[in-house]
């Protein structure tokens, strides 16, 4: 499916990727909610891509069933696990004018999505990210442990790399096609550090990053393990700090 399959020459095509690992229970509700929202945003042509990365439950079959009943939905299956791996593969194969992703739980209020896309398609920015740490952001139901961990992690990034972006981990990001093609081949991580690595490389190599304050509600059922993820993130930061940030071609 290409841009021309929508409205030729009139609307930019935006692909929204939902990386999914064992999400058969939440996926139908999330896709229905997302598709309904996107149908109310006629300024762009939209495609929703469910990127199933080696799920061991019925996620793939559920995604395929949703694709049969919603013209906007497509499915991409990977044999290996990893959110970063799924995003890199999906974004690099895409023919959309802008690519973005959000977590399946839709923790971030969708009203911020058009602002991300406008920034990378019309605002002169290469990357746009949601931030939960801006003054205008609203965060609900987040535990103190997660809040402190997130703030400390982002402060550590600033201390090590002198970056300006405030929230590396918010699962709500967009790139235009040129930035994706230029940036993603250099991002090595295949898991949750993918976001941070992408942003550090982007900013340090001169790409413009735009932040959008978001309304965000914590998902109490998240399967992300804080300690394990924090250790992986720390190893990733040390790799970039002492191994060097790649120069984009």
Image (cartoon, rainbow, N blue to C red):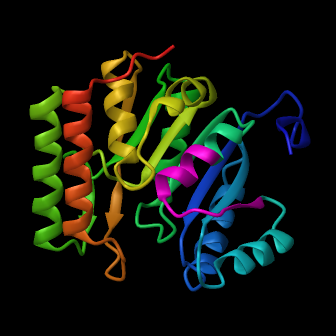
**Residue ID at (71%, 37%):** 96
Q: Residue 119: x percent and y percent?
A: 49, 30
The answer to whether 215 appears left or right of 157 in the picture is right
In this rendering, does residue 166 appear at all? Answer: no
Q: Nearer the viewer, residue 114 or 220?
A: 220
**Quarter assignment of residue 227:** bottom left
Q: How many circles with numbers are drawn on the protein? A: 0
Q: Nearer the viewer, residue 162 or 15?
A: 162
**Residue ID at (58%, 60%):** 18
The answer to whether 61 appears left or right of 225 in the picture is right
Q: Residue 218: x percent and y percent?
A: 31, 72
**Quarter assignment of residue 160:** top left
**Residue ID at (34%, 59%):** 215
| 74 magenta-colored | yes
In this rendering, does residue 219 appear at all? Answer: yes
Q: Is residue 101 above or below residue 99?
A: below
**Residue ID at (31%, 81%):** 220
Question: Which stretch is magenta?
Answer: 73-89
| 57 magenta-colored | no
């Amino acid at each position: 499916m290409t841009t021309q399959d929508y409205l030729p020459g009139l609307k930019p095509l935006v692909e929204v990727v939902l990386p999914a690992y064992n999400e058969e229970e939440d996926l139908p509700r999330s896709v229905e909610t997302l598709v309904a929202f996107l149908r109310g945003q006629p300024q762009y042509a939209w495609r929703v891509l469910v990127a199933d990365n080696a799920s061991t439950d019925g996620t793939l079959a559920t995604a395929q069933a949703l694709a049969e009943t919603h013209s906007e939905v497509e499915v991409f299956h990977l044999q290996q696990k990893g959110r970063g791996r799924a995003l890199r593969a999906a974004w690099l194969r895409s023919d959309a004018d802008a690519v973005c992703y959000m977590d399946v739980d839709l923790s971030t209020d969708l009203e911020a999505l058009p602002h991300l896309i406008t920034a990378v398609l019309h605002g002169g920015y290469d990357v746009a990210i949601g931030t939960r740490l801006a003054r205008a952001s609203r965060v609900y139901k987040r535990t103190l442990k997660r809040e402190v961990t997130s703030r400390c992690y982002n402060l550590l990034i600033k201390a090590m790399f002198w970056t300006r972006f405030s929230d590396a981990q918010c699962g709500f990001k967009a790139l235009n096609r040129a930035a994706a093609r230029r940036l993603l081949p250099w991002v090595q991580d295949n898991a949750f550090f993918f976001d941070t690595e992408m942003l550090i490389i982007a900013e340090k190599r001169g790409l413009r990053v735009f932040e959008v304050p978001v309304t965000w509600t914590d998902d109490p059922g998240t399967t992300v393990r804080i300690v394990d993820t924090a250790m992986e993130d720390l190893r990733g930061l040390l790799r970039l700090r002492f191994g060097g940030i790649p120069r984009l071609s």
